[in-house]
Image: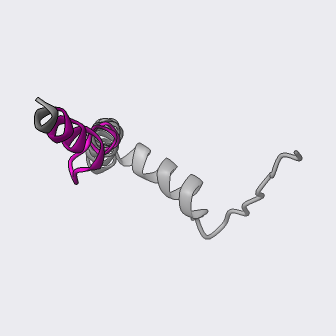
Amino acid sequence: MLTSIIFVLWMLLFDQNDIISQLQLRYEIHQLEQQKAFYIEQIKETQADLDDLLTDKQQLEKFAREKYLMKKPDEEIFVIVPEK
């Protein structure tokens, strides 16, 4: 009986796969699954934006102007940065 109790305590507290380690690993898995879901959603949004840019010439021009400050030869660009 004493041997069984010692064995159970050893397995629960001192073994490589003790309860605390298992709980930490489950928490880490949960965090990684949340990150995976976030990145999958980001990929879907980016893919939709890419499809939009490849099919709509006006969207492509708007993107180039806003993101990369591209302009036509006879235009000037003014960048307005809001104060914090």
The percent coordinates of residue 68 (x first, y second) are 55, 63
At which x and y percent is residue 82?
A: 83, 46
Image: magenta residue range: 5-24
Say whether residue 12 is magenta: yes
Residue 74 in sight from this viewpoint: yes
Q: For the point 12% across and 38% down, which residue is it? A: 3
Q: Nearer the viewer, residue 57 or 45?
A: 45
Residue 40 appears anywhere in the view: no
Task: Give the main secondary structure, helix, strand or loop, of the magenta stretch.
Answer: helix
Position of residue 70 in the picture relative to residue 4 (left or right): right
- Determine the residue positioned at 61% across, 62% down: 69
Residue 76: image quadrant is bottom right
Image position of 69 (left or right of 42): right
Does 75 lie within the magenta span? no
Instruction: Give the residue at x 31% y 41%.
Output: 52
Direction front: furthest residue: 2
- Quadrant (top left, top right, bottom left, bottom right) of the C terminus: top right
In the rendered image, residue 21, in percent from the top left (x then y), is placed at 30, 45
